[in-house]
Amino acid sequence: MGKRSVKRRQKAGEFNSDAYKEDQAEVRALFPGTNWSPDDKEPMRDQRFIKTVKPRSDGQAKLMDAIERFNLVMALGPAGTGKTYLAVAKGVEALERGDVSRIMLSRPAVEAGESIGFLPGAMEDKLAPYLRPLYDALADRLSPKRLKTLMAEGLIEIAPIGYMRGRTLNNAFVVVDEAQNCTFGQLKMLLTRLGWNSTMVVTGDPAQSDLLPEMSGLAEIADRMDELDDVAVCRLASKDIVRHPLVATMLTVL
């Protein structure tokens, strides 16, 4: 902090000159009643990212309402409609409120023809490129320190689809992302992982599957779930896209 800043604060009456006495070694605040920090760029406190997530379309409003009311929600729609973001945001809110004890995020590790080859490192390092979108969504809702702490404590777990078999997810908020890259058998396995006091949100875009059309089971599963009254199937459209307007325009011709 420069001399000019001190003089300016002193003239404004913020500087506490009485806090310094020769016969008193007690350390007091330079600027009492303010939140000033010695390092404004990185304050010495745990910054909390508290954002109010509001729907930006009727489809998003229906999806957010369905997540609050149903234990199993399937969100289908084109890219850019906020399916994954809204699901992760609702999961973080449920965890912060204490409604659930953990967040479970799962995604299929499907190589979409890019032939990225051998990836060095442990299993977590190999799967990191596939799970990166989930990390990005979490990082937008939580501070880096808070996110790291929750993951270290096991309150937030990110795992590929293949490691979900045989598990029972009680008291958890489960998000299954990119479900269009799951087969019918994989989705059946995932849906039957749902335990007590848990919410599961399955998101995907049947039009962007990296599998063969006859292998993807998302569209068939969603059609069958439409018949159940206690399961919500939300189908978002191009009008719900919140990315660049060109995204909605391009999807009309692609």
Image (cartoon, rainbow, N blue to C red):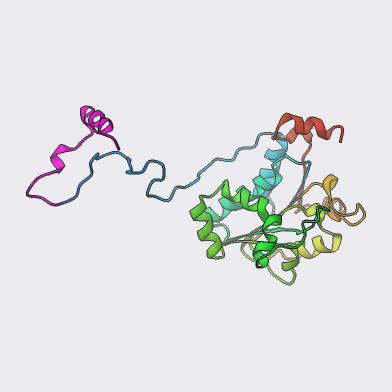
Residue 68 or residue 25, whichever sits in front: 25
* Residue 90 seen in the current view: no
Q: Quadrant of residue 230?
A: bottom right
* Residue 86 falls left or right of residue 146: right
Q: Residue at x 53, y 64 (%)?
A: 152
Q: On the picture, is 46 further left or further right than 223?
A: left
For residue 110, what is the image quadrant? bottom right
The residue at 26%/30% (across/down) is 4
Is residue 105 visible in the rendered image? The answer is yes
- Residue 244, how many percent across, how many down? 71, 32
The image shows residue 146, relative to residue 78, as above or below, that is below
**Segment colored magenta:** 1-25
**Which residue does the image show at 73% across and 38% down from the upper left?**
59
Residue 66: percent from left, percent from top: 69, 47
The image shows a total of numbered marks equal to: 0
Magenta highlight on residue 18: yes
